[in-house]
Amino acid sequence: MNFKRRVGRLEKEFNVAKEIVLWRVVISNVGKTVDLATSTCTRTLWNRQLSETIHLDGHPDTITDEEFEQFVESFPILDSEGRVVTLPDSARVIRK
């Protein structure tokens, strides 16, 4: 049995919470095109809540939603102690 299937079975057996609430804050500069090279993002998971703080160097309307999501997802999710966290494939992220 492979590892991913076993983890999936354990998650189902112990009813691991599959819903994660997303809180996203976007801070941006108005009046210029976004420069992703100088933009930053912090993603933190705590108590089944994912907090994302995105600092865009430029106005968000100057990039597509797809480019924005790819940029955000390029940053790791950290726990409260700064360790990298991987969300389970079964997790469902709910935006608030």
Image (cartoon, helix red, strand yellow):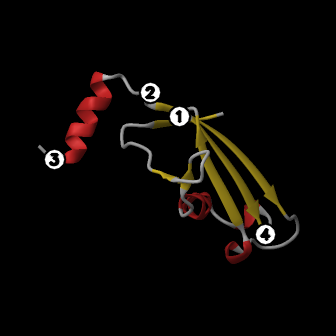
Q: CA distance from mark 1 to mark 4?
A: 28 Å
Name the kind of residue labelled 3 in the image. Asn
- Residue sitting at x 59%, y 64%: 71
- In the rendered image, residue 41, in percent from the top left (x then y), is placed at 67, 60
Query: In the displayed structure, would residue 18 be above or below residue 29?
Result: above
CB within 8 Å, label 2 to label 1? yes
First in sequence: mark 3 or mark 2?
3
CB within 8 Å, label 3 to label 2? no
CB within 8 Å, label 4 to label 3? no
First in sequence: mark 1 or mark 3?
3
Total labels drawn: 4
- 1 vs 3, front mark: 3
Question: Quadrant of residue 8 in the image?
Answer: top left
Q: Quick one: label 2, few (<14), some, or many (20+) residues within 10 Å?
A: few
User: Tag on residue 2?
Assistant: 3
- In the rendered image, residue 58, in percent from the top left (x then y), is placed at 80, 68
Q: Nearer the viewer, residue 27 or 49?
A: 49
Q: Which residue is mark 4?
A: 57
- In the rendered image, residue 87, in percent from the top left (x then y), is placed at 44, 45
Q: Quick one: label 3, few (<14), some, or many (20+) residues within 10 Å?
A: few
Q: Farthest left residue?
A: 1
Q: CA distance from mark 3 to mark 2?
A: 22 Å
Question: Quadrant of residue 42 in the image?
Answer: bottom right
- 1 vs 4, front mark: 1
Q: Which residue is mark 2?
A: 17
CB within 8 Å, label 1 to label 4? no
